[in-house]
Image: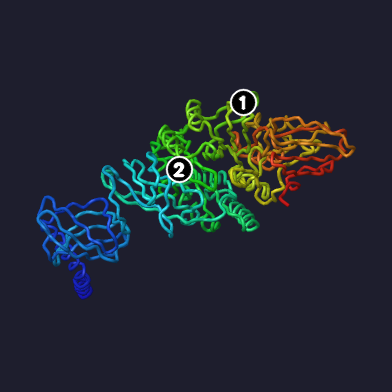
Amino acid sequence: MKKIAAYLVWFVLVAGLPLMACSKDEATEVASDSFGVSFDCPSLIEVSKGGEYTFQVEGGEEPQASDVLVLESTDGISYTCTLVSVSENSFTVKISEGCESGTYRVFIKRGDRKKQIGSTYINIVEGMDFTPDAGTTVYGVVSTADGPVPGVVVSDGVEVTVTNEQGIYQLQSDKEWGYVFISVPAGYEVPAEGVLPQFYKMMKGDASTAERVDFSLTAVDGQDDYKVLVLGDMHLANRTGDLKQFMEFTSDLNAYRALHQQEKMYAIALGDMTWDLYWYSNSYALPEYLNTINSQVKGLQIFHTIGNHDYDYKATNDRDAESRFMDYIAPTYYSFNLGKVHYVVLDDIDCSNYDGTTSRDYEKRVSAGQLSWLAKDLSHVDKSVPLVVVMHAQVFYPSQTDGFKVDHDVLNTTQLLNVLDGYKVHFITGHTHMNYNVTPDDAVTGGREVYEHNTGAICGSWWWSGYLTPGVHLSPDGTPGGYAIWSVNGTDMEWMYKATGWTEDYQFRSYDLNNVHFSLADVPQMPAGVPASVKKEYMKYVDAYPENQDNEVLINVWNWNPRWTLKVTDENGNTLTPEEVWAYDPLHVAAMSVKRFNSSTLTSTPSFITEKFPHFFKVKAADADVDLTITVCDEFGHQWTENMQRPKAFSTDAYLPR
């Protein structure tokens, strides 16, 4: 036993020698900090590759000529910089050739002694024979490989300026947002990191430091003729089979792009790429979204909008709530040009009332700061240029009694429309998971040339309908899960909606209501003691579709607007008059709502169930057997026809993609 004890003592002594040596080294380094060199370490150092920089001595002694400056990168790589000259008040060093732009810890080293002074961001810049004006805090050059680009609009989110003939811009920026961005000019593109276009850069210096931020562009041909793929709510959260279903969407998107590979394409995401409630519980947030989209979509630049579910619900103010979006994706508002159209992305979700809980008390409005910026941005855009204004939440919403109504903060919406006055404006929005269109013909626009295209969701009913009924992927209004395709030629624009898994010809769906009915027998697992209010919600579908033989046909035209036409004739040549109605989409009821209500654990009304909505029409046929020809035509002359053989069976299998 004594031998074992002696061995253990010997082992501890031997094993401890390296540890004791480390402690001695650390103690020596701590002691080495006592030498009295002190100098100002700025937040930003701008220097050419291998160039020189002068530090100001303050509150201590100047370095000795034999001292060296050590820069340690965030990767732990150290660069030694020799002193070129030393005076009582300053000293100049030659920055190591190996240094790239990045954040560094700054040390002064004398023999074996090393003292950390602070940290800084070193910006390696190319030479530019230019001295910024007094008060300028951010400046730079916008150029291509062939030289500078004049007339490019540049902003820090507050102030707006343009580049001069030498491609140089200057801003007297308070650096409120910490970034600077360009409004990508027509005929150019910016580099991309994955799907993200790099039209903005973070500033590194404090508000009193002038810093240089350059942007590079690539000239492109044929940009007057292109397509924009509009991607509505995705709601990725790693639940309800969403990642598998999302891959079906990206496969469809890539197949469409392959069919049109000779055409120039861009994309706009309308927000709610993620689902904040599952950022923490499912470890799926904005970084995971980027991993997903970048692994499945290549060579497509996607301009992103922030949605209410892309805010951090644990925050207690708007700025903190949106910070992760700005960290990973883009500014929350900005503009860019594609061909002869000016695009503006705005943030219309105000999270000022957030309290750090899942209550997520937000309001739909555009901040006063954005409106001020927008007016400055548009001062560089001629009134003849069409505007596409992209926001997450809808501006208008249909009312069953009063047509379309403002569905934003009313005063704020008036202010927004005033800033946009005189332009032809197309709002493109998401959020509702429905699909509808407002035109200047609607009274709510006040006679302005204003449109709104509220675009259906990629995720449909938050991925639930496709999860419960594979292959039947619908939003609560019966719009198929999918995306919009805008075709732009000069200032002319056409738009259509494409359902995931279907060809572009799938633009409406018909139901022979003689064969559509719902009853309590469809939900045998609904508990007998379910609250009356829950049962009442389900009975809406039963009451809407009782078992009868009225020979009615229901038609869902999800991208309808008043400039479209619908013609129905029967096999005898008789023209039937369609009646515009609000309705529940029967397929969504069968694929989604029935299955949500048919649960033995049901205690409250399920979420994401079928909603009554416009863009439905009814016609009455002469009898149960007469066939119909249904023809739908949009305002661009595209025509779609169904030869409806009646009786037409109704089941979820009958409406699978084909």
Does residue 191 appear to the left or right of 10 in the view shown?
right
Which quadrant holds residue 404?
top right
Total labels: the figure holds 2
In percent of the image, x 72 and y 42: which residue is there?
637
Q: Secondary structure at mark 2?
A: strand
Q: Residues within 10 Å of mark 1 (few under 14, many from 20)?
A: some
Q: Nearer the viewer, residue 48 or 258?
A: 48
In this rendering, is residue 253 above or below 341?
below
Residue 523's spot in the image, x, y percent?
69, 38
Q: Secondary structure at mark 1?
A: helix
Q: Residues within 10 Å of mark 2 (few under 14, many from 20)?
A: many
Does residue 419 appear to the left or right of 396 in the view shown?
left
In percent of the image, x 48 and y 45: which residue is there?
336
Residue pushed farthest front?
165
Residue 267 seen: yes
Residue pushed farthest top?
401
Residue 621's spot in the image, x, y percent?
84, 34
What is the three-letter code of the residue carrying label 2?
Answer: Tyr
Does residue 387 appear to the left or right of 109 in the view shown?
right
Residue 289's spot in the image, x, y percent?
50, 51
Circle 1 residue: 443
Residue 243 seen: no
Q: Nearer the viewer, residue 403 or 183?
A: 183
Q: Earlier in the sequence, mark 2 or mark 1?
A: 2
Circle 2 residue: 334
